[in-house]
Image: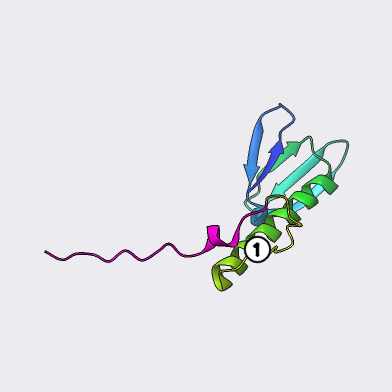
Amino acid sequence: MIGLTRRTGDLCRLDPDHIERVEAHPDTVVHLTDGARYCVLETVDQIVARIREDRAAVIAACYVLDRGEDADPMGLGRIPVAPEAHGPAPAIPLRRS
């Protein structure tokens, strides 16, 4: 989900997979696949950057889930997270009574 600011000042979050197109008239309008339209304060370039960041985060999370490693070992991303934080939790044996 990406956060945007509506013209009224309200904050909203949109699923970037549901964004069909973004138009820049005097105002920036986001068109969704279900026909909804949102008039927002952000520019088209800002919206594209947020979509790119969201998709990169999804790809990095998939990499971590698949390999159990940090997808950004050099810490070039925004939030450094230790690889251990993404690893599986320790197995705790169950006792049967």
Q: Residue at x 59, y 66 (%)?
A: 64
**What residue is pinned by disc 1?**
60
Element type where label 1 sits in the image: helix
Residue 23 location (% of width, % of height): 82, 47
Quarter containing the C terminus: bottom left
Residue 90 location (% of width, % of height): 40, 64
Q: In this rendering, is residue 48 above or below 41?
A: below
Give the overall secondary structure of the magenta segment.
loop
Residue 27 location (% of width, % of height): 83, 36
Is 76 placed left or right of 83 in the picture? right
Q: In this rendering, is residue 39 above or below 9?
A: below
Q: Amino acid at mark 1?
A: Ala
Q: Nearer the viewer, residue 47 or 59?
A: 59
Q: Tell me, what colour scheme is on the image?
A: rainbow
Q: Nearer the viewer, residue 12 or 79?
A: 79
Q: Residue at x 66, y 58 (%)?
A: 57
Residue lying at the far bottom of the rendered structure: 67
Q: In this rendering, is residue 87 above or below 77?
A: below
Residue lying at the far left of the rendered structure: 97
**Does residue 81 show up magenta in the picture?**
yes
Q: Residue at x 63, y 42 (%)?
A: 13
Residue 28 location (% of width, % of height): 81, 40
Q: Nearer the viewer, residue 77 or 51?
A: 77
Q: Residues within 10 Å of mark 1 (few under 14, many from 20)?
A: some
Q: Residue at x 62, y 69 (%)?
A: 63
Is 75 placed left or right of 68 in the picture? right
Q: Which stretch did the figure color magenta?
A: 80-97
Residue lying at the far right of the rendered structure: 26
Q: Quadrant of residue 37?
A: top right
**Does residue 92 show up magenta in the picture?**
yes
